[in-house]
Image: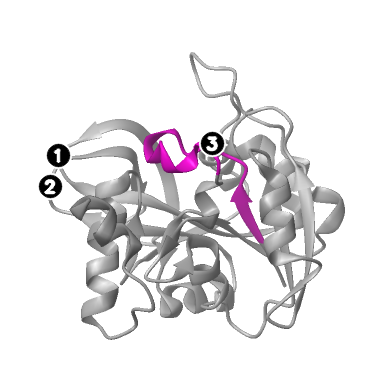
């Protein structure tokens, strides 16, 4: 099984740190964001595909052609045309089931394994009991299958945690443009796919979205409290 990591973005909300460094290479507790997730992949993942764009050479130089025992391929997204477009660029490298992960979110090891081992296509979701902005997931209460993704601001509910298990037949479905933008969204394309294929929702036990520098510092403190801290650069950044 292949794991596709989306790492082409500019990480604008992490500036000034991302002016000269890709967000995926920012280190939290001494380990890059992308590395945190790679280290949690199950053994069934035998190859990494990293979609690069902004400062791509740094990511390529860091991970090379093989990383922690797995071969690595790189796919360049030359224009920021959205997550759907980014995944579509990987079609020629994928056969059968594959995972899609955001390079700058942190996922739980157990959640990744649950998605990878699931028999159907699946989407990781997180139940929130406070206001949030993002894709609210509506599921069939009887089958747990994906029905609707509503983008916007919501008071509570299930949010799209942006970890997907898909099959290569997903590439047979056309890209779907996000209304009012020039980008093609992966969630929007998934909805079209879900009309003809069962896509199950799996609730996350651990998912951390790192949107800005304060998020990163908060996560670093958590990791350090758990005794897995090799460095405290974000904590020190806010002290300076």
The numbered mark at residue 130 is: 2
Alpha carbon distance from label 3 to label 2? 28 Å
State the colouring used for the structure image.
one colour
Q: Is mark 1 in CB contact (under 8 Å) with mark 2?
A: yes
- Label 3: few (<14), some (14–19) or many (≥20) C-alpha neighbours in 10 Å: some
- Label 1: few (<14), some (14–19) or many (≥20) C-alpha neighbours in 10 Å: few
Residue 123 shown left or right of residue 56 in the figure: left
Which of discs 3 and 1 lies nearer the camera? The answer is: 3
Q: Residue at x 26, y 77 (%)?
A: 224
Q: Earlier in the sequence, mark 3 or mark 1?
A: 3
Residue 231 shown left or right of residue 167 in the figure: left
The x, y position of residue 130, in whole percent, is: 12, 47
Helix, strand or loop at label 3? It is loop
Residue 77: quadrant of the picture: top right
The x, y position of residue 119, in whole percent, is: 59, 74
The x, y position of residue 4, in whole percent, is: 66, 58
The single residue placed furthest to the right in the displayed view is: 92
Alpha carbon distance from label 1 to label 2? 6 Å
Q: Which residues are magenta?
A: 4-20
Residue indicated by mark 3: 10
The single residue placed furthest to the front in the displayed view is: 240
Q: Earlier in the sequence, mark 1 or mark 2?
A: 2
Residue indicated by mark 1: 155
67, 97: nearer the viewer = 67
Helix, strand or loop at label 1? It is loop
Q: Earlier in the sequence, mark 3 or mark 2?
A: 3
């Amino acid at each position: 099984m292949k794991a596709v990591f989306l790492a082409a973005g500019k990480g604008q909300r992490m500036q000034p740190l991302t002016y000269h460094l890709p967000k995926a290479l920012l280190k939290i507790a001494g380990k890059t964001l992308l590395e945190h997730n790679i280290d949690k992949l199950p053994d069934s993942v035998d190859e990494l595909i990293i979609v690069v764009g902004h400062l791509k050479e740094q990511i390529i130089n860091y991970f090379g052609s093989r990383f922690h025992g797995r071969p690595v391929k790189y796919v360049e997204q030359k224009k920021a045309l959205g997550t759907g477009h980014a995944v579509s660029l990987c079609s020629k490298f994928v056969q059968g089931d594959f995972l899609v992960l955001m390079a700058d979110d942190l996922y739980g090891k157990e959640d990744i394994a649950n998605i990878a081992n699931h028999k159907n296509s699946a989407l990781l979701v997180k139940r929130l009991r406070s206001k949030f902005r993002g894709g609210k997931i509506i599921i069939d209460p009887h089958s747990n299958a994906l029905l609707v993704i509503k983008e916007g601001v919501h008071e509570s509910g299930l949010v799209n945690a942006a970890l997907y298990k898909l099959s290569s037949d997903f590439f047979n479905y056309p890209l779907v443009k996000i209304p009012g933008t020039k980008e093609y969204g992966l969630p929007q394309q998934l909805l079209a796919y879900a009309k003809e294929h069962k896509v199950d929702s799996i609730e996350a036990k651990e998912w951390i979205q790192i949107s800005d520098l304060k998020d990163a510092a908060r996560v670093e403190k958590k990791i350090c409290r758990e005794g897995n801290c090799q460095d405290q650069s974000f904590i020190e950044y806010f002290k300076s």
